[in-house]
């Protein structure tokens, strides 16, 4: 069973539908007991970093999430669900993230004031080529997708880890963008697999079946 965490943010219906397409039981839930019973966990997120962290804090689910991660349960973060794995964000100064990944969430280069005349639209919204890095561990989310698949992005910020070795994929949008990260049993994508058609389904398949 895959638990999609419901803490009041995120494109839950689309995520639920996309995960269910893999032929597995899906529970969109804010119940700690359901999360504890899950084989795998999906942590979605949309909107501002601070709003997501406030909702997650208010939900009371952080201890359960951390407990399941420490127990080795695979977790997949999506979009702001990736960003809140970091220690904090320029978008919401003073708001701590989960701190699972050391580093900060920062404006992508295209969104910085000095680069706004480069003609790139901000937020970074639409399909963008992604380059997966080697080695692809612990689970190769990009297995079967070739060298340069395209995924759907909607964001102005991205994770900048202290250890670049946790970056498993990048994109280019007026500069390098962190597209995916992995630390132990925790993986996350800045792009939206649930909005990325067949390639997104392959990501979910690799996460669920890997």
Image (tube, rainbow, N blue to C red):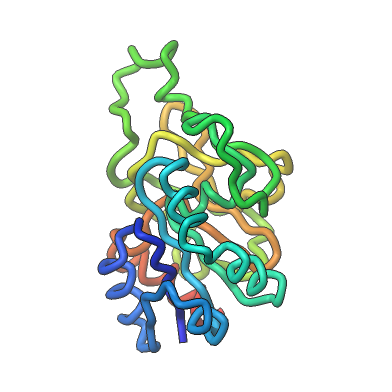
Residue 73 placement: quadrant: bottom right
Against 52, residue 201 (above or below) is: below
Look at 40% across and 75% down and name the residue there: 29
**Residue 116 locus on image (x, y percent):** 36, 16
Q: How many marks?
A: 0
In x, y percent, where is residue 161? 66, 41
Using the image as rendered, state which of residue 18 and residue 52 is in the foreground. 52
Q: Could you say where residue 197 lies in the image, as x and y percent from the top left?
A: 28, 64
Q: Is residue 158 above or below residue 119?
A: below
* Drawn side of residue 108 relative to residue 199, left or right: right
Q: Is residue 139 above or below residue 39?
A: above
The residue drawn where x is 52% and y is 83% is: 33
- The one of 64 and 114 positioned closer to us in this rendering: 64
Q: Residue at x 36, y 64 (%)?
A: 199
* Quadrant containing the C terminus in the rendered view: bottom right
Q: Residue at x 45, y 77 (%)?
A: 31
Front residue of this view, candidates 125 and 76: 76
Q: Is residue 161 left or right of residue 22?
A: right
Of residues 160 and 99, which is closer to you in this image? 99
- Residue 178 in percent (x, y) is at 53, 43
In the rendered view, does 144 fall on the left or right side of 197? right
């Amino acid at each position: 069973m895959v638990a999609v965490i419901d803490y009041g943010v995120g494109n839950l219906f689309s995520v639920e539908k996309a995960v269910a397409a893999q032929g597995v039981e899906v529970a969109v839930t804010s119940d700690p007991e359901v999360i504890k019973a899950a084989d795998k966990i999906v942590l979605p997120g949309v909107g501002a970093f601070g709003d997501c962290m406030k909702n997650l804090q208010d939900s009371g689910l952080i201890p359960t999430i951390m407990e399941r991660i420490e127990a080795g349960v695979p977790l997949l973060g999506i979009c702001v669900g990736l960003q809140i794995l970091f220690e904090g964000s320029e978008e919401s100064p003073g708001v701590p993230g989960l701190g699972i990944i050391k580093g900060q969430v920062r404006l992508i280069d295209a969104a910085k004031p000095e680069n706004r005349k480069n003609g790139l639209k901000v937020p970074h919204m639409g399909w963008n080529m992604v380059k997966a890095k080697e080695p692809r561990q612990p689970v190769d989310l990009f297995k079967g997708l070739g060298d340069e698949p395209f995924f759907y992005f909607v964001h102005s910020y991205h994770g900048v880890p202290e250890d670049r070795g946790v970056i498993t994929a990048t994109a280019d949008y007026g500069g390098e963008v962190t597209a995916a990260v992995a630390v132990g049993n925790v993986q996350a994508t800045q792009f939206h697999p649930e909005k990325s058609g067949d390639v997104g389904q392959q990501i979910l398949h690799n996460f669920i079946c890997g």
